[in-house]
Amino acid sequence: MRIIAVLLLAVSFIYANGSLDIKKGWQLIGVSTTVDIEQSFNNKNVEIVWGYDASTQSWSGYSPNDSKSAIITQSYSTLTTLKPFQALWIFSNDDWTLEYTQASSTETPINSTIMLYEGWNLVSIPQNTIVSDKFFGEAIVWKYSEDQEWSVNNNSLNFPTIDAIKQSEGLWVKSSETKTINIDKQSSKLQTFDSRDNMLAYIRKMLEINRSYYMYTTNDGGISFPEDTAAVDDSNEDGGSTTSTGADDATSTNLQEEGVDEGDILKHDSTYIYSADNTNGKIIVTSFENITKKIYTPITSLDFSGKYIKSMYLQNSRLSVISSNNSYYLYDYAKEYIKPSQNNNSLELSIYDVSDVNNITQISTHTIDGYYKDSRLIDGNLYLISEFAPDVEYEYLKIYTDTICSTLSMDEIGATCNGYSTISSEYLEDDAEVNYEKSCEYGEDYTLYYENNCYQYSYDDKGAWKYDYTSASVVGENLVPTISSNSQSPHDLVDVKSFYAPMKLNQSANITTISRFSIDSGEYKVSSSFLGNTHTHYASLNSLYLVSSEYPLYYDYAHYKEQQMIYKFSFDGNLSYIGRGFVEGRMLNQFSMSEKDDYLRVATTSGWSWWADGGTNNSVYTMTVKDEELSVEAELEGLGHENETIKAVRFMGDRGFVVTFEQTDPLYTLDLSDPKEPKVIGELSIPGFSSYLHIVDENRVLSIGRNADENGRSLELQFQLFDISDYANPVLADKVQIGDEYSYSEAEYNHKAFSYRSNDLMFGVPYRTYSRTDYSNSENFGLYKIDDLTLQPVHTITSSSSDWGDVGRGLIFDLNSTTYGALLKGSNIVCEDIK
């Protein structure tokens, strides 16, 4: 903890001070904090400083030169201070650096807005960000560079166009109205483009601003998996019957929203089961009837060698499989190309007609550049979310050095290795000394090597060299993802008419795309894309919400706001962009969001338990769209005890449930019937915590989580049943615990691993237990039943074999008047009669 405190102190010291390079001659600058003009500019380098008050459209000035100061006082007021967003004109006699201290207000952030008045304004961006020339909307913006050249944001004027606007750059802005610009909302506003060329230019600009350097070798194009086309294995050796009896009441993928199907590694149609076996690169096809007869050999299989199966859907006799194909690079510091191409990664959507399991046919295949993020299937339309990393490859000139480093290649520096080294540390108690084995004793050349920073050079037969990063030539670029359908020539996945980009330029240039496919025809239909990353996705029947963390804001360095940006898209024919909005804090998972009527409910946690000035705050927001803004209608904050974070969330109709945890587990019941006034109705505090909440009915809630001791240390797996018949006074009705702290279940963080039957209230989860006696693992599928207000163990299925590369899924079903449970993990299947 002492080390952490020292680091935090160091960071706060760094960000508490700032500096700004002032060039000789005239310059437009902004300081991004409130400064005392006389204190900051009273030196020999300053000739004169001018400020402009847009509210009165008048000048004020300051000069340390007595003669210039007299001229100012005759006709103008004296410039004393500037607001953080106000800029100034300065004439300097020489180059110098302005050192200043950031304001440390402990109240609200002081750099969150820019005030514009009708007419001319002299302003700057008071945050550490870079924005596009469209940031000020329709206003005319002039920028005066340090090279003393003007540029403007209007193409019709005969001046260079503004490339980007950075912090501390002064701007002349002519506004047609008086208004306040909220910086975070404006910088996150999505804009479109009138041409593909302009779209590509914007992507290049973002890449250039955020460019970093990596040395690599492509190893003849990289090491990649083979791109085998998925094939059907029709051998059916010992595969049992291919005409099977259907099962009744078979559990299927556990969904967040009824009618919104989610991809999983196991799907069935009540007769045949399709299960991903990533260890062996295939999808196995079996039947409920076969596994009840202990016939575990697949009826058939689909070959996915060299690919990783991410998700599957089964609807309308169509099996849709999403898989990834990744390529890798070997790194080599002797090569000349700098930024490695990231676009050898692709995902594939394969759609099969499985109406005849003996004759499965592939009706379409689509290959998309990028990574798989998530997907949903609604009424025969598959919505696939992918992410693509644009890149530009540069070549740089080598600069050879004539310093001592040219003769000090590390490969030629020898060392004698033996002995011990004794050191003391300020972080050790009582200045204790610790002996470390000393690996080597180095000679004079080694000392010279590091004293002269020779490690920054590479070496070849000509000597020591490094790249000149100021001189770059583009040798290749790949800026937008493509899609290739049925082996046809690839074309752009993004459409310039539905491509959106934020005003903020200093962020990831990754492209997130939502694509719609018809599973009946197998055709690709339409896409919408935007520049930015996403990490959490929620879908209702009508809307798709994508969450990004691109906008944590640094206002005045004393304030850091942890925010999540939520983008809303419609599931209409064009996948229309609806709007975006902010919530403070971070979300746990997709269950942190839920839509009802025209409102989105969102649960977040802000802060961390170890923060020196504050702890955590857990909140529930209600939001609705107004003028393309997903606006906060109400906030219910203060959920949980001190330093607790959200561990589980579930919204259901007008009700909400939130679990927070640090040492105990408060379960909160919420009334969300009035979205403008959400309320806490009840609270229950018990040991342990819940990580997934399942609504049984209006009177009962089931949870999956962990037991915990009095210090908050996680113990064994735990199921809990809550009685919420008195909604204001929830009660723990029963609980069941499994194994110990080494037990593990995917259902703790993935709701799809939870199997549930509503007709008889039976449920099950796959889990692994670990024996500390013989150090063995046991793969299990535990089945339980809710009986009124008790949890009854039903059966446990144990598998003797396991593929570490696969996760398991459990099934509960009836066949021929018998109830069965089955555990499928890769190609390993165990099915047993459970009652």
Image: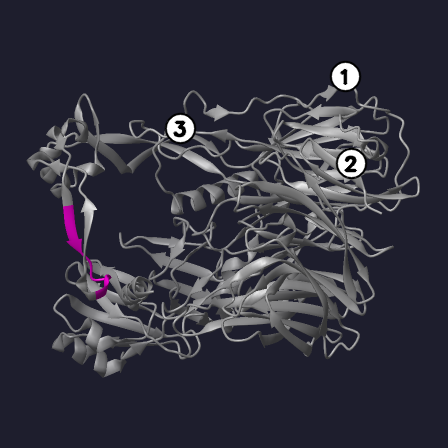
Quick one: which residue is furthest to the right in this view?
Answer: 817
Q: Give SS at disc 3.
A: loop
Marks 3 and 2 sit apart, C-alpha to C-alpha, by: 38 Å
Q: Quadrant of residue 548?
A: bottom right
Mark 2 vs mark 1: give the one in front. Answer: 1
* Residue that numbered label 1 is attached to: 235
Residue 82, above or below 151: below
Q: Position of residue 656 (x, y in %)?
A: 71, 69
**Classed neighbour count for the residue bearing mark 1: other residues with Cα under 10 Å, few (<14), some (14–19), many (≥20):** few
Amino acid bearing label 3: Leu
Q: Position of residue 365 (x, y in %)?
A: 70, 28
Q: Earlier in the sequence, mark 2 or mark 1?
A: 1
Is residue 424 one of those drawn in magenta?
yes
Q: Is residue 264 visible?
A: no
**Classed neighbour count for the residue bearing mark 2: other residues with Cα under 10 Å, few (<14), some (14–19), many (≥20):** many
* Residue that numbered label 2 is attached to: 519
Task: Name the residue at 41% across, 25% down.
Answer: 218
Q: Is residue 670 visible?
A: yes
Which region shows up in magenta? Answer: 421-429
Amino acid bearing label 2: Ile
In the picture, the quarter occupied by the N terminus is bottom left
* Residue that numbered label 3 is attached to: 330
